[in-house]
Amino acid sequence: MTQDIETILRTEGIETAITCGKAHMIAEKYQIPLTEIGSCCIKNNIKISQCMLGCFK
């Protein structure tokens, strides 16, 4: 599944950074658990910004 998420992120134009809102949108659009998107971002050094909880800036 990780390879699929990597492909989806590239398709959505995500290479080095993603906003929390965009991660939520992708999770909903592709029916992927948000935690899997987060794990894929961490694995691929994709920075998460504008966290809705204030965890990442």
Image (cartoon, helix red, strand yellow):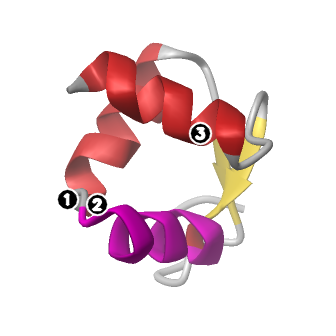
Q: 10 Å neighbourhood of mark 1: few (<14), some, or many (≥20)?
A: few
Q: Is residue 22 magenta?
A: yes
The residues bearing labels 2 and 3 have C-alpha atoms spaced at a distance of 13 Å
**Residue drawn at 36 percent across, 45 percent down:** 37
Q: Quadrant of residue 57?
A: bottom right
Give the extent of the magenta segment: 21-31
**Residue drawn at 25 percent across, 66 percent down:** 31
Asked whether, in this view, residue 10 is left or right of residue 26, the answer is right
The residues bearing labels 3 and 1 have C-alpha atoms spaced at a distance of 14 Å
Q: 10 Å neighbourhood of mark 2: few (<14), some, or many (≥20)?
A: some
Name the secondary structure under disc 2.
helix
Q: Nearer the viewer, residue 8 or 54?
A: 8
Q: What residue would you read off at disc 1? A: 33
Asked whether, in this view, residue 1 is left or right of residue 34, the answer is left
Residue 56 vertical placement versus 44 (above, below): below
Amino acid bearing label 3: Leu
Q: What residue would you read off at disc 3? A: 9
Asked if the residue under mark 1 is in contact with the one under mark 2, i.e. CB atoms within 8 Å, the reply is yes
The residues bearing labels 2 and 1 have C-alpha atoms spaced at a distance of 4 Å
Amino acid bearing label 2: Leu
| Mark drawn on residue 34 | 2
Amino acid bearing label 1: Pro
In percent of width and height, residue 28 lies at 36, 76
In percent of width and height, residue 53 lies at 46, 81
